[in-house]
Amino acid sequence: MFRDPLANPEPLIPRVYAYVAFRMGHGPDAEDVTSETFERAVRYRGTYKPTKGAPITWLIGIARHCISEAAATREDQFREAPEVAGAGDLEEETVRRLSIRAAIAGLDERDQEVIALRFGADLTARQIAALLDERTNTIEVALHRALSRLRSQLESKPESDPVRIPAPPGLSKGES
Amino acid sequence: MRDRWRRRHDPFQEEVRASRPEPSSDFAQRVAASVRARREAPRSPLRVAVALGSTVLLLAAVASFGGFGYAANAVRGGGGGGGNQATAQNGGPSQEQYKRFICHRTGSKKNPWVLIEVSENAVPAHQAHGDIIFPPGTTREEAEAACPPPNS
């Protein structure tokens, strides 16, 4: 029986966006890729099989394709022109969040991917394993290692130091 | 379960989760509206035509095998070989109705005749063998009284 994976799109949008933004940086590029993901999802929703996983896993699979296509065609603005925000500009919590995002962006590809899937798309280790075609245990270990590296990277960078963040929409230096 | 436990007990993971980028509400609403609009859009005429064509083909295939009336008759026990089976399965007259008692010639000197019950389909073969076939509706008692035949 056909089950529409996009019957209730509202809760799926922030999860897909968060995953994409963790991978590409928060901003218009992430919005474009998220839009493209949903565009394709609507077009190919007939191919969704509930037995293979939840709608979010299916959508993240589409988003991964969109990200690799976007990466092939666009410049990585996050790495080339990062914005610098001083701790004095923003509240402490916001600075901490931006530091975490910047630290995630400094991790290697694999670590970024598992962290984005786990904490951006909010997938379980089992769902990530299914998506990446790996064992759940492997993913749990990878997550644990990625978090350890993230933690040590954050500890090595004091919070009072300026943090390098991607340019979020409406949060450029002049507006904050 | 284990994920929930971790979520509750590791403040660093909570912090990482809290740092996740959120889309602007305007963007989220725009995407949701676009998805809903496209989901509710009327189906393309080509898809409707394909669906109609498949339905017509299916109906033609059913009609070529006798149509729906044949199936209905079969269920009522009205006709066809399948009718008997369908009637028996549906609690109508039992398969006993299609059994016949016969006085079977064994060829033995000691017991030349024996009363047996066979399917109606087997009647012609027994008749050819020289058995005595009782008419439909004959009870077992009547058949027993008449087998062996008086002149045997």
Image (cartoon, coloured by chain):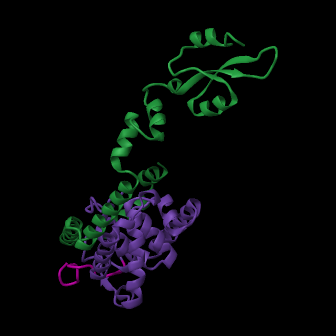
Q: Residue furthest front?
A: B151
Q: Quadrant of residue B7?
A: bottom left
Relative to residue B70, is residue B25 drawn left or right? left
Q: Quadrant of residue A42?
A: bottom left
* Residue A151 coordinates in the image, percent (x, y): 47, 68
* Residue A52 coordinates in the image, percent (x, y): 46, 60
Q: What is the quadrant of the C terminus of chain B in the image?
A: top right
Instruction: Specify the segment rendered in magenta.
Output: A161-176
In depth, the one of B129 and A160 nearer the eye is B129
Q: Give the mark count.
A: 0
Say which colour chain A has: purple
Q: Is residue A102 magenta?
A: no
Q: Does residue B62 lie above or below A68 as drawn?
A: above
In depth, the one of B77 and B53 nearer the eye is B77
| Residue found at x 37% / y 85% | A70
Q: Residue furthest right?
A: B109
